[in-house]
Image: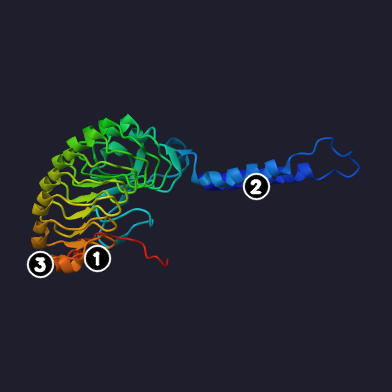
Amino acid sequence: MNQPARIVVAAGFALVAVCFATVPVFGARPAKKKIDTAAGISLVAKLCGSEAGAVTLAEYAKHDPLKLFTATRGAEMPNAIDQTNNLHERDKALLLSGKGLTDITGISKLKVEDGGKSVPVTSVRNLHLFLNKNQIAVIPDEIAALKNVVFIYFNHNQLSALPSILTEMDSLVGMYFSANQFTEIPPFVFGMTRLKKLQFSENRIRVLPAEVGNLKELRHLNMSHNQIAVIPDTAARLTRLRVCDLSDNCITALPEAFGQVQIVNQLRVRNNPITSLPAGFATMRATIDITGTKIDPASLSPEMRARISTEKPSGSKDEDKIIVRQPLKNK
């Protein structure tokens, strides 16, 4: 019996117990102290609600098979939570999003099912670790043993700090931490110079440090929906950017040096009190989304105006490169 089924059964028994306890038996004297029916109902509600929370990884793994998903051309992602754009042919994914997990202790010692065989999680090459939409507040140091993991996804959790031992994950090239409780990017992150994708959107970050310029391999940087007021000049070192999202912050200006970066697909600065753009952006391939800013398109050069759009340039979405599809919304 899986975890949700056990919870439903337990809730059923609890409800029956409440009902019997509150119905007087024929011929019996009324109880001097009534049983608190509301408390019983509350207990049932808690039991029914616990399916989405208060589950440790160890508990979950005891009762639910940990089958890996293999990325193959034309395959469909088994859930609508996790993104597919980073998956390449034959990559593996451990899908633990939306399981109500609060504690992932033991993650480095898991056995997973890969092609019908039970294997150590540490032995799977090019592994993507999806832990979105849980209740995780701490990432244990043992995660460093997952030297085979290429992307980690912890969007929509309760993280406010990260273990510096993440630097020992030798294959790691992408980290996603949107919608958590960060007030700063942990300084050690800027020493992880292999990173190609970094996402800290929807947090409470006020400062983008100058050290961001160390991450010269970045293709994707998403710092949207924070409280950032200043973009450092060192952003000019991020010369391999394909997408940069700085939307919904407090930015009033971008450094002229940043205009040297020839972003490939899109720069998003929407909903910032910004009034102008660095002149260098007029020659880049990327479009620029200025929705909700104080920029007057009429004040821009014709070349810069041609870059203004909410859509990426034609050819940015190469359908042939998409290996795994998202599930259809009407399913």
Residue 148 relative to residue 34: left or right: left
Q: Earlier in the sequence, mark 1 or mark 3?
A: 3
Using the numbered discs, state the Cα–Cα distance from disc 2 to disc 1 in whole angstroms: 51 Å
The percent position of residue 99, horizontal first and vertical second, equals: 44, 46
Give me the residue at 17% from left, 58% from top: 276
The percent position of residue 330, horizontal first and vertical second, equals: 42, 67
Q: Residue 303 carries which label?
A: 3
Q: Neighbour class for label 2 at 10 Å: few (<14), some, many (≥20)?
A: some
The percent position of residue 240, horizontal first and vertical second, equals: 12, 51
Using the numbered discs, state the Cα–Cα distance from disc 1 to disc 3 in whole angstroms: 16 Å
Viewer-proximal residue, 105 or 157? 157
Residue 319 location, quadrant: bottom left
Circle 2 or circle 3, nearest the eye? 3
Residue designated by label 2: 12
SS for callout 2:
helix
Give me the residue at 71% from left, 46% from top: 16
Q: Which mark is residue 310?
A: 1
> What amino acid is at disc 2?
Gly
Up/down of 327 relative to 154, above or below: below
SS for callout 1:
loop
Q: Earlier in the sequence, mark 2 or mark 3?
A: 2
Q: Earlier in the sequence, mark 2 or mark 1?
A: 2
Viewer-proximal residue, 241 or 96? 241
> What amino acid is at disc 1?
Thr
Q: Neighbour class for label 1 at 10 Å: few (<14), some, many (≥20)?
A: some
The percent position of residue 228, horizontal first and vertical second, equals: 27, 46
Up/down of 33 relative to 114, above or below: above
Using the numbered discs, state the Cα–Cα distance from disc 2 to disc 3 in whole angstroms: 67 Å
Give me the residue at 10% from left, 60% from top: 284
